[in-house]
């Protein structure tokens, strides 16, 4: 059983040597436990925060200890009556080939309605985050102009399509580079693409939405958040989902210079953690699985092959090497 451990804490951008792949015995399930052969694992930007020795909403990884994250796999041994051998489950012990879990730590997923890896993307916390952002945190109303950052990524590509389903009149997305911009429009149905590498986000956003925006989904922070605050109309709303532009920062980062706009325009900016809202999963999965089936929710994924590639996939997602969900396929 090959398992990734945190070899050392990164300073700034993580490097391959921060990860160590070690060989361990394949564990055996005890009473109430299952053994899962992982087939897909997720690498997520928030994992960067867990590599630091810092207090947050989720404990840091320990140096010398295993890494964790979302994964799906097949149950190959079971001492838990409720989960049979052969079931496909999602769980939180990725970064390893075999995961030993208490039955309560695994969720059996329905591979009749979607592919296993969809439960790490559109039907996982990724999709639920986009859904919460636009229905609970910064609800979209009919006719709104919506702006999404990291729009060609996993959360962003779903957010753009949900905004449209919820009645947005115009959906603007920001992504790095012309290829991603093309993808935003041709695959994910955005109206306008902003290339954040090509020039000022504020300037491009003002050109894309001369009358301003009503809703912003922030995956990036920094220049994107400042541009969105500037563009939001009176009573505008923003869901603060993540701030990937600062995850590798080695010191405090400057805040938006236009916070007074919150007062004058009576803006609502609200953070969200998907883990507070997991009770919404059944409702969301019911809708999203139907959209995947009828083709009105389109997904892409960037796949790295083999557990050895997991660190490269993770470094890649932080740098923008992905379109849609970044995944690692294990054990083929
Ligand atoms: P993505 O698939 O969106 O991948 C991250 C993307 O961020 C990259 O592809 C890259 O795209 C973009 N990016 C990286 N650095 C910068 C930068 N400096 N400026 C602008 N864009 C940048 O990842 P996820 O969909 O998994 O996550 C998106 C965000 O949502 C993250 O901030 C994450 O932490 C957050 N999140 C929060 C959750 C919550 O519960 N609050 C749950 C899930 C995710 P590009 O090439 O376009 O620059």
Image (cartoon, rainbow, N blue to C red):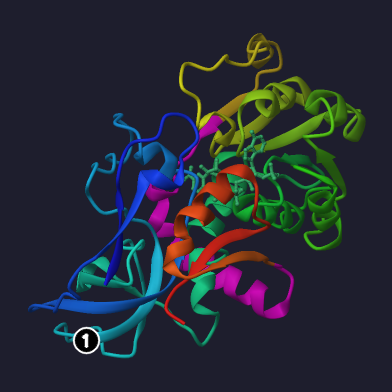
Give the side of residue 18 with respect to residue 311, left or right.
Answer: left
Residue found 20% across the figure and 68% down from its top: 24
Give the side of residue 50 with respect to residue 291, left or right.
Answer: left
Local packing at callout 1 (Cα closer than 10 Å; few below 14, some 14-19, many 20+) is: some
Q: Examine the rendered structure and indicate whether residue 279 appears above or below residue 298.
A: above
Q: Secondary structure at mark 1?
A: strand
Residue range in magenta is: 270-298
Give the side of residue 154 with respect to residue 283, left or right.
Answer: right
Front residue of 185/326: it is 326
Residue found 71% across the figure and 52% down from its top: 152
Residue at the left extreme?
31
Q: Is residue 297 magenta?
A: yes
Residue found 26% across the figure and 72% down from its top: 1
User: Which residue carries the number 1 mark?
Assistant: 77
Residue found 29% across the figure and 78% down from its top: 36
Q: Quadrant of residue 97?
A: bottom left
Q: Quadrant of ligand 1?
A: top right
- Most common SS among magenta residues: helix
Q: Position of residue 176 (x, y in %)?
A: 75, 42
Q: Position of residue 13 (x, y in %)?
A: 50, 35
Front residue of 115/138: it is 115
Q: Position of residue 96 (x, y in %)?
A: 32, 66
């Amino acid at each position: 059983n090959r398992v990734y451990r945190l070899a050392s804490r990164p300073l700034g951008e993580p490097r391959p040597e921060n990860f160590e792949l070690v060989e361990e015995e394949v564990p055996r399930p005890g009473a109430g436990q299952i053994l899962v052969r992982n087939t897909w694992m997720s690498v997520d930007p928030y994992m960067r925060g867990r590599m630091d020795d810092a207090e947050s909403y989720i404990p840091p990884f320990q140096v010398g200890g295993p890494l964790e994250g979302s994964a799906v796999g097949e149950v190959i041994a079971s001492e838990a009556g409720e989960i049979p051998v052969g079931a496909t489950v999602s769980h939180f012990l990725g970064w390893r080939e075999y995961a030993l879990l208490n039955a309560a730590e695994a969720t059996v997923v329905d591979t009749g309605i979607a592919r296993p890896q969809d439960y790490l993307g559109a039907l996982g916390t990724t999709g639920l985050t986009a859904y919460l952002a636009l229905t609970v945190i910064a609800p979209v109303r009919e006719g709104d102009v919506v702006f999404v950052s990291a729009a060609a990524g996993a959360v962003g590509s779903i957010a753009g399509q949900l905004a449209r389903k919820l009645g947005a009149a115009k959906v603007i997305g920001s992504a790095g580079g012309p290829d991603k911009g093309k993808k935003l429009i041709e695959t994910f149905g955005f109206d306008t693409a902003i290339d954040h590498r090509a020039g000022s986000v504020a300037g491009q956003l003002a050109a894309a939405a001369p009358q301003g925006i009503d809703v912003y989904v922030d995956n990036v922070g920094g220049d994107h958040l400042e541009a969105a605050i500037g563009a939001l109309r009176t009573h505008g709303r923003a869901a603060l989902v993540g701030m990937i532009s600062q995850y590798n920062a080695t010191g405090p980062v400057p805040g938006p210079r236009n916070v007074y706009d919150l007062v004058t325009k009576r803006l609502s900016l609200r953070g969200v953690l998907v883990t507070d809202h997991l009770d919404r999963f059944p409702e969301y999965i019911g809708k999203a699985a139907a959209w995947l089936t009828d083709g009105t929710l389109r997904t892409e994924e960037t796949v790295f092959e083999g557990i050895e590639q997991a660190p490269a996939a993770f470094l890649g997602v932080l740098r923008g090497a992905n379109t849609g969900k970044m995944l690692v396929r294990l054990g083929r």
